[in-house]
Each structure stands twice: as C-alpha cells, then as structure tokens.
C-alpha cells in the first residue's frame, strides 16, 4: 500500500512539474535554455528546452538558430544544419543564421560550402563585421588570398579597431600576390667601435606557393672594411588553420662579415582573442656552433600590435638572455604602421649585430637598444619604409659604445 501511494504521489509531482514547464512562454523557455547552455554547460537540457519553446513558436528564428548552435557544440552537425536551413529557407536575410551555418561548415572543412552561405548573407548585410571576417577566413583557407585581402580591407576601413581582422590581414599580407621583390639599405655609424661606418644591403624575391611563401635573399655587408655576401632562403609553410612554421637557412663564405652558416625554425600558433605564440631555435656557425632558443607572444588590440620576445643562449657556465618589446600602431592596412621597440641583448635575427655573437662560448656581449620604423603603402602593391635605431653596445669585454642605424627599404608585390 505504501509503495502504491509513493508511486502515485511521485506521478502527481511529475505532472505538476510538467504542467508548470509547459505553462511557460516560449521566451521564458528560451531564457532557461540559454542558462542551461551557458551557465550549466548542460547541452541536452538546453536542446530539450529549445524544442519545447519551438513547439509554441515554430517560426521563432532566434530560438532555432540557438538550437542549431547547441547542436554544433554537441557535435551533432547534421541536426545543426537542419535547423539553420529551416531558418534560411524562410528568412534568407537572417544574419545570425548565415554566420552560424557558415561557421559550422568552415570548422568542418567545408570551406566551399561556407563561402556560398556567407556570400548569400552578405547580399543582405554587406557591412556585417562577423560575415566579412568569416568570409576572409574561408577565402584564406581556400588559398584565395587576394580576395581574402580585399575582404579584410573592406572590413578594416569600416572597423579600424577590429583586432581579429588585423591579425588575419598581417598573416596573409605576403600571400595576396604571387610575387614580391624588395631592396633594403642600412647605414651604421659608431662613436667608438669603428671609425668607418658599416653598410648593409639586401635584395629579396618572394614567391607564393601552395604550401606557403618562399623567400630568397642576397645580403651584402661591409664591416671592418671587409666585404661579404650571404645567401639565404626562408619559408613559411602552412600547417593548419591554427599552426604555421618559419624555416630558414643561410650560407656565406665571408666569415667575420657573416656567419658561415645560419639556420632557424619556429612554430607559430594563432590563438583565441587575437593572440599569437611562437617557439623555436636559431643556429649559427662562425668557427664554432651556437644554439639559441627563442619564444614570443603577440597580441592584436584594436589598431595596435604588441609583441614580447626572448632569446636564450646556453653556454658552459650560464644562459645568456635577450629580451625585446615591440609595438605597432596601424594607420591603415596591414602595411601601414608606426613601430617602436626597446630591448636588451643581441638578436640572432638582427643582421646589423649578428656578427657580435661571434665571441666564443664563455662570455656574451651585452646591448641595450631602442628602435623605430615607419611603413607606408601606396597604390596598393608598393611599400616604402624607414627605420632608425640606437644601440648602447658592448663591442668588447666591458667596453661600451653607441651604434646608430638609419635604414630605408622598398617592396613591390605583383
């Protein structure tokens, strides 16, 4: 008798709860579904509540798009597609549905399908920041870099502080044309280290390939009244939507002006919130081997880019440390900016001072520096830039002097 009574009371409570739930409006059910998804991370509950809401309001597009998103987060992609298609079949101008559906296809490696969805959405909302950024990502994934660059230009003109657009534009700027040529020249003078100035010049040619850009350099230097040439090749292969790499190798027969050989590798990761991280190494050989390890973290914030980098050089008795902080302020597109930097130590990626790393293994020369640069594009495919820096440099053991550098460069994409 007690068991029957308990079961009967349980059914009454269940019916009351069900009645209370079904008595809620579609908006109230939608609010509960959102709480279940965002606060509780309970996707099955959110799906159930959304379905209940849709039985009351089948044409409530916001709820159906939300349901499609929850299906996406639950890896139920077919169910998500069904919900997005229902919305777009009745309301092809629904921006949220186009963005959610396009994002689903993009992250499921169907960039061609995503492009069609996003392009349709942009017909109704040509200024949509979300749709423009997604279209640029899709075009980048399809290796249609010029179109991706044009889409980002449109987005940045309307929203100059869009950090995600800045980050993507900076990553693909060298991919927007098949070819790039460039020339740079640096004039370096000293107050103590040398009576004669140093001269550095470089010619470069870059070619965009299916795996990423490949760049060849012919570098010239006149240091200590000696001339030298260095041959160098860099590559930036794409690995995935998140990762890409930097690989470099160089050779010179003029040791003392350049290292005999140099090499480098870094792995880059494009992180959420417009962050980018890097870790890698550099190798130099003058008369002995030098291994240098590097790591950096970068962040785009509105029209700014910030970067912190360190180089660590192990030796028999200690680890030499180098640090630098750089900031850019973008005045226009990816090739238009002002840059400022400060740092300590000598960078193996800096052709001006790399020769000072040829100092044996027991003692590492020290340096403090400040730098500035101005980059300006014109007629879209031309870039001119000016650089300046001052180094308070230890050029011999506990012997310091000042080094002054002025540089100019030009690049042409075609």
Image (cartoon, helix red, strand yellow):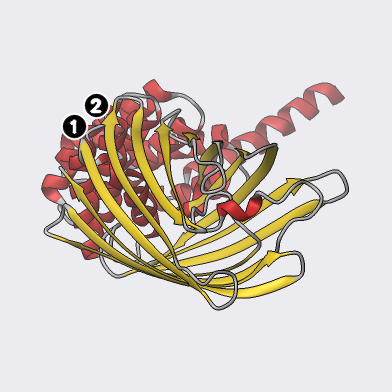
| Residue at screen point 62% across, 55% down | 356
Residues at badges 2 and 1 in contact (C-beta under 8 Å)?
Answer: yes
| Residue at screen point 15% across, 52% down | 126
Q: Tell me where residue 70 appears, x and y as whole percent.
A: 46, 36
Query: What is the number of the mark on residue 116?
Result: 1
- Give the labeled residue for mark 2: 113
Q: Nearer the viewer, residue 124 or 258?
A: 258
Query: What is the number of the mark on residue 258?
Result: none
Q: In the figure, 265 relative to 301: above or below?
A: above
For the residue carrying disc 1, how many other residues have a C-alpha within 10 Å: few (<14), some (14-19), or many (20+)? few
State left or right for residue 148 relative to residue 387. Answer: left
Q: Nearer the viewer, residue 147 or 60?
A: 147
Q: Tell me where residue 32 appears, x and y as whole percent.
A: 52, 49
Q: Residue furthest bottom?
A: 191
For the residue carrying disc 2, how many other residues have a C-alpha within 10 Å: few (<14), some (14-19), or many (20+)? some
| Residue at screen point 47% across, 47% down | 29
């Amino acid at each position: 008798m007690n068991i029957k009574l308990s079961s009967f009371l349980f059914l009454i409570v269940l019916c009351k709860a069900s009645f209370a739930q079904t008595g809620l409006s579609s908006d109230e059910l939608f609010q509960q579904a959102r709480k279940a998804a965002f606060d509780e991370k309970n996707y099955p509950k959110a799906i159930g509540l959304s379905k209940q809401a849709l039985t009351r309001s089948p044409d409530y597009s916001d709820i159906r798009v939300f349901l499609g998103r929850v299906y996406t987060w639950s890896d139920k992609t077919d169910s998500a597609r069904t919900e997005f298609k229902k919305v777009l079949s009745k309301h092809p101008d629904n921006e949220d549905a186009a963005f959610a559906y396009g994002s689903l296809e993009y992250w499921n490696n169907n960039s061609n399908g995503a492009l069609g969805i996003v392009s349709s959405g942009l017909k109704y909302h040509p200024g949509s920041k979300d749709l423009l950024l997604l279209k640029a990502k899709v075009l980048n994934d399809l290796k249609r870099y010029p179109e991706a660059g044009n889409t980002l230009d449109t987005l940045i003109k309307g929203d100059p502080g869009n950090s995600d657009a800045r980050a993507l534009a900076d990553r693909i700027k060298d991919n927007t044309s098949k070819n790039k040529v460039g020339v740079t020249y640096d004039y370096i003078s000293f107050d103590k280290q040398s009576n004669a100035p140093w001269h550095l010049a470089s010619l470069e040619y870059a070619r965009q390939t299916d795996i990423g850009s490949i760049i060849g350099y012919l570098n010239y230097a006149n240091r200590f009244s000696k001339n030298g040439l260095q041959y160098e090749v860099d590559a930036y292969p794409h690995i995935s939507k998140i990762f890409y790499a930097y690989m470099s190798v160089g050779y010179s027969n003029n040791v003392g002006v350049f290292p005999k050989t140099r090499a480098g590798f870094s792995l880059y990761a494009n992180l959420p919130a417009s962050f980018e991280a890097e870790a890698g190494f550099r190798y130099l050989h003058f008369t002995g081997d030098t291994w240098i390890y590097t790591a950096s973290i970068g962040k785009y914030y509105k029209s700014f880019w910030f970067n912190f980098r360190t180089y660590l050089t192990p030796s028999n008795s200690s680890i030499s440390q180098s640090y630098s902080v750089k900031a850019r302020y973008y005045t226009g597109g990816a090739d238009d900016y002002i840059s400022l930097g400060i740092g300590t130590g000598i960078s193996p990626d800096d052709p001006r001072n790399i020769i000072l790393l040829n100092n044996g293994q027991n003692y590492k020369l020290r340096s403090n520096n400040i730098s500035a640069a101005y980059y300006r594009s014109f007629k879209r495919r031309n870039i001119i830039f000016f650089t300046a820096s001052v180094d308070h440099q230890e050029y011999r053991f506990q012997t310091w002097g000042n080094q002054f550098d002025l540089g100019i460069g030009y690049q042409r994409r075609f």
